[in-house]
């Protein structure tokens, strides 16, 4: 979808030719004297329209408005959160056949965060999964104009708009790849998706196959992959927008394209959802898509260990001991605790980039879903500074996380009689003990772990990937850029090069 930001009063919005006009109305929306504002005021006064977030009034063929369809959207006090709720409620209107061009206008002085929220929620609402459906009517919506009238903080609004457009694209890419069934999103296909991101300016991609991974000594990663017919891929993405030699942030995304549990096999119920077990990997792809669009002055490395976790005659068995790339040996007591195995070798590999920080993103534990549900991702780090930065980024992006503990005592259950460590501790505090396992592979590099098992996808009727935590990660990365370099001003050449969707998987 194409987004455009335009300075528009409500009167000007009414004159704009489009198929659908959405008007965000707050409690404090000033009653202007133009026809549309008068109508809104009447509707509120008559009790036919309430301004609390989520409330709507649909209108059609208004003589004073150029758009055929008009939808008034209550936006409460006008906050980013309420705008998200309001726009999400307009999803079916935005996806309706015959709506190719829509205008979303703020009938109040919207802050930068509210404008960003409108872009993101509209993009989220307009997304639909089609890749493996034989009969689909594509969403008609091609263009969304965002109309804001306020003069205050124009620069802030423009900057937030640009970030939100890039973020929306990254979120859509992450959702698309996470949604694709495991037979349509194999490690090889994920690597192809990463390679096509390298068409964006500043991005390069290297893909390591089984022979190279063996040569690197990634025994933990290989153990997980060995039960599968699908060859593993170790994907390495680089975004170089910062000073040459400036320490990068490394993102490591768990890329289990399907998790059966292996020999410690999972129960059948809902096992299909384990196609989402590459949600961390998908979020790394999404972030790189956004970076390619925004061109911030930072360096970022993305690492994705991608493979399936399958039961097989060749599969790793409970009790098998493997040697990780770090040299530490691991007794694989439960083959279903595979995420930490593939991540451990990727974290060891990350050290070669001398990162300023590394963040791994993983659908790691069912225990994290029990602890935090679907609202906040679990965040683990020994660094208070990194914790604060991630918390702030999550709050700003409406993609929140919650810090969890890492006391050393939590790691005691990982001891093994036959190796340097086991890959599981007891049932208690399962999300924490998983993080303690990962911590053994990070050395002295500032590191954080995001457990997105509860936030990467939704179950039930709305089953599907969320694209989280692309927003959190992107905001975190942008905040690490030298202040002078924000916002990234694209050169005309970079913009031209970035324009075609570059093999992105969006519908
Ligand atoms: N991918 C799963 C974690 C998961 C489970 C995410 C359910 C979302 C919903 C992970 O590989 C796994 O199986 N973890 C085990 C660890 C256990 C064996 C220590 C778990 O959480 O049960
Ligand atoms: Mn598992
Ligand atoms: Zn898993």
Image (cartoon, helix red, strand yellow):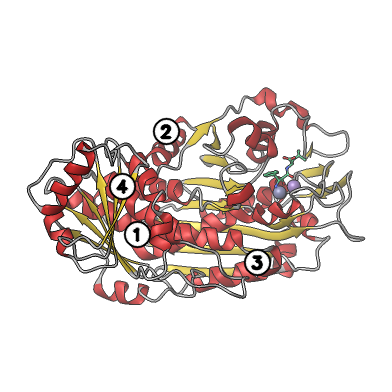
Residue 418 rendering spot, x and y as whole percentages: 88, 38
Residue 165 disc label? 1
Residue 241 rendering spot, x and y as whole percentages: 36, 62
Front position in the image: 7 or 224 = 7
Residue in the picture at 39% in, 37% down: 392
**Mark 1 to mark 4: distance in Å?**
22 Å
**Mark 2 to mark 1: distance in Å?**
25 Å
Residue placed furthest toward the right: 313
Do we see residue 245 in this rendering?
A: no
Q: Secondary structure at mark 3?
A: loop
Do we see residue 133 in this rendering?
A: yes
**Mark 4 to mark 2: distance in Å?**
34 Å
Earlier sequence position, callout 1 versus callout 4: 4
The residue beneath circle 4 is 73
Residue in the picture at 37% in, 60% down: 166
In the picture, measured across the screen, residue 426 lies left or right of residue 479, that is: right
Nearer mark to the viewer, of 3 and 2:
3
Residue 261 rendering spot, x and y as whole percentages: 80, 49
User: Mark 4 and 2 residues: CB-CB less than 8 Å, in contact?
Assistant: no
Residue in the picture at 26% in, 47% down: 24
The quarter of the picture where residue 396 lies is top left
């Amino acid at each position: 979808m194409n987004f455009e930001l335009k300075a528009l009063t409500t009167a000007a919005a009414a004159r704009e030719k489009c198929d659908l006009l959405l008007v965000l109305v707050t409690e404090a929306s000033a009653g202007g004297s133009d026809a549309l504002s008068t109508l809104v005021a009447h509707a509120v006064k008559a009790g036919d329209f309430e301004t609390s977030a989520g409330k709507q009034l649909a209108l059609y063929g208004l003589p004073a408005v150029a758009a055929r369809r008009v939808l008034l959207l209550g936006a409460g006090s006008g906050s980013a959160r309420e705008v998200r709720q309001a726009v999400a409620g307009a999803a079916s209107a935005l996806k309706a056949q015959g709506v190719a061009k829509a205008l979303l206008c703020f009938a109040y002085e919207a802050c930068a965060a509210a404008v960003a929220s409108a872009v993101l929620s509209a993009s989220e609402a307009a997304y639909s999964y089609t890749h493996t459906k034989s009969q689909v009517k594509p969403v008609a919506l091609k263009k969304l104009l965002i109309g804001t009238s306020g003069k205050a903080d124009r620069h802030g609004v423009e900057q937030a708009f640009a970030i939100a457009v890039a973020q929306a694209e990254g979120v859509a890419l992450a959702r698309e790849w996470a949604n694709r069934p495991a037979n349509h999103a194999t490690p090889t296909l994920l690597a192809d998706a990463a390679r096509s991101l390298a068409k964006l300016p500043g991005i390069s991609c290297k893909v390591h196959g089984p022979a190279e991974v063996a040569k690197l000594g990634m025994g933990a990663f290989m153990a997980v992959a060995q039960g599968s017919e699908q060859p593993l891929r170790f994907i390495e993405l680089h975004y170089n927008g910062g000073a040459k030699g400036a320490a990068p942030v490394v993102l490591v995304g768990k890329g289990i394209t399907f998790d059966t549990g292996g020999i410690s096999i999972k129960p059948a119920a809902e096992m299909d959802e384990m196609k989402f077990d590459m949600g961390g990997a998908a979020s790394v792809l999404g972030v790189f898509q956004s970076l390619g669009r925004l061109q911030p002055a930072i360096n970022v490395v993305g690492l994705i260990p991608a493979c399936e976790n399958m039961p097989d005659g060749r599969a790793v068995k409970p009790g098998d001991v493997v040697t990780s790339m770090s040299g530490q040996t691991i007794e694989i007591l439960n083959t279903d605790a595979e995420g930490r195995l593939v991540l451990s070798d990727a974290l060891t590999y990350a050290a070669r980039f001398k990162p300023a920080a590394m963040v791994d993103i993983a659908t790691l534990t069912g225990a994290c879903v029990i602890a935090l549900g679907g609202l906040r991702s679990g965040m683990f780090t020994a660094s208070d500074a990194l914790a604060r930065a991630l918390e702030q980024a999550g709050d700003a992006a409406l993609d929140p996380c919650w810090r969890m503990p890492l006391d050393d005592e939590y790691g005691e259950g990982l001891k093994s009689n036959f190796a340097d460590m086991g890959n599981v501790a007891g049932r208690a505090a399962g999300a924490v003990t998983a993080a303690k396992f990962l911590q053994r592979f990070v050395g002295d590099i500032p590191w954080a772990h995001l457990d997105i098992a509860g936030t990467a996808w939704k179950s039930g009727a709305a089953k599907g990937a969320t694209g989280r935590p692309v927003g959190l990660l992107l905001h975190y990365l942008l905040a690490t850029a030298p202040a002078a370099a924000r916002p990234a001003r694209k050169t005309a050449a970079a913009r031209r090069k970035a324009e075609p969707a570059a093999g992105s998987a969006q519908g």
